[in-house]
Image (cartoon, grey):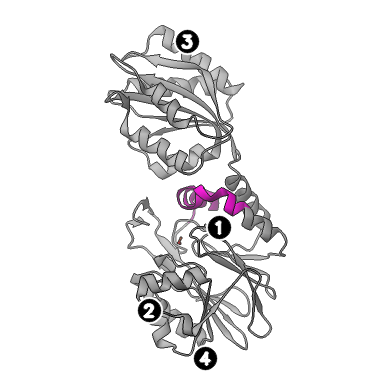
Amino acid sequence: MVNITKDICYIGVDDHEIDLFEGMYIVPEGMAYNSYVILDDKVAVMDTTDRNFTGAWLANLEAALAGRKPDYLIVHHMEPDHSSGIEAFAEKYPEVKIVATAKAFTMMKNFTGKDYTARGIVAKEGDTLELGSHTLKFITAPMVHWPEVMMSYDEKDKALFSADAFGKFGALDAVDEEGWACEARRYYFGIVGKYGAQVQAVLKKAAALDIRIICPLHGPVLQEDLGYYLDLYNTWSSYGTETEGVAVFYTSVYGHTKAAAELLAEKLQELGCPKVAVSDLARDDMAEAVEDAFRYGKIVLASTTYNADIFPFMREFIEHLTERGYQNRKIGLIENGSWAPTAAKVMKGMLEGCKNTTFAETEVKILSAMTEENKAQIEQLAKEMLE
Ligand code: FEO
């Protein structure tokens, strides 16, 4: 339990037992499910927690309340990592009013089988809730990350309760050696990345507010240099280039395609490319590869031909990109195929619908192992990627 301001208290929990967040993402540093309480004339609790931590969260809440009773539960997001404590909380505090969007009340019923509307306050865009010296203003944020999502802005402490936005992987008691952006970027592109337009819409609303504190549902509370975080969110949600350089992604069965990808990386470095990131799509974390594809403005895909198609990990990777609205990129292609190479054609076909995306003219076709001609083509591709 930590005081964020005089009246806002952190009551969330760290999860070090989780193996895969949302059933898909590795979280070696665990996960934090954040929850807050505002202690004013009225007491507002901001979200609940994951199902495995309801007891610990209720204990944190009770300690923060110090004998007081809560008046409101504000539900910003119904995904179960934040909403699983609603039933136990509502039972423990039967006088509490639940504040959420109309869609959230429908989801509450779908998840719990219980209708909370009789003790509910339906929040709409711009509605306010007076707590005493604090006034909460509600900002709807559909599809950041689910349709029922809203944020709250506390006018007194200038705190934005931002739901999943500005969240990251990692428990709060883990040492964050790589800095916020590393796991925040992987989280953003994995979980919210498809909804760039909706994030842009919320950022526009946020620009009209004087925000001094961001209280997300995951990751640390952000209190300093907020422009840094807002700028990154603007770049990510507008599918802009965050880092100058080239990201190279490959799949390889016997090492020949890998050798081509590594030669390309070497040539790019020799030509002064500011940064070259290389990922083996079969062995590296897929979510890390996805975030890199969005981080850099230029990517090269190198794939083995497989079943007259592309290697399965490359197919999965490209699908992750296209389903997240991949756009504004320059793409280079390297294919390998011992008798009938088809990978370049398939990769291009999968990416052709991406908005504002161009393909390098040089396409490298390897028939098993690189020839001298292939090596020259790779050098040419490196030059073209840097133009
Ligand atoms: Fe952290 Fe979309 O839930």
Identity, as a three-letter code, of the amino acid under mark 1: Phe
Per the rendered image, the range of residues in magenta is 176-200
The one nearer the camera, 301 or 342, is 342
Say whether marks 1 and 4 touch (CB < 8 Å).
no
Task: Check the image and report above or below for 259 versus 279.
Answer: above
Indicate left or right for 307 with 372 as reference.
Answer: left
Kindly state the secondary structure of the residue where label 3 is placed: helix
Of the image marks 1 and 3, the number of the one nearer the N terminus: 1
Residue denoted by label 3: 376
Query: What type of secondary structure mainly makes up the magenta span?
Result: helix
Residue denoted by label 4: 68
How much space separates mark 1 and mark 3, taking CA atoms?
Answer: 44 Å
Identity, as a three-letter code, of the amino acid under mark 4: Arg
Indicate left or right for 65 with 52 as reference.
Answer: right
Residue denoted by label 2: 114
Q: Residues within 10 Å of mark 3 (few under 14, many from 20)?
A: few
Task: Check the image and report above or below for 230 versus 254.
Answer: below
Q: Residue at x 33, y 70 (%)?
A: 52
Q: Position of residue 119 (x, y in %)?
A: 49, 85
* Ligand 1 falls in quadrant: bottom left
How much space separates mark 4 and mark 3, taking CA atoms?
Answer: 74 Å
Q: Position of residue 224 (x, y in %)?
A: 65, 60
Would the CB of label 3 be found within 8 Å of ligand 1?
A: no
Which disc is residue 166 wearing? Answer: 1
Say whether marks 2 and 3 touch (CB < 8 Å).
no
Identity, as a three-letter code, of the amino acid under mark 3: Ala
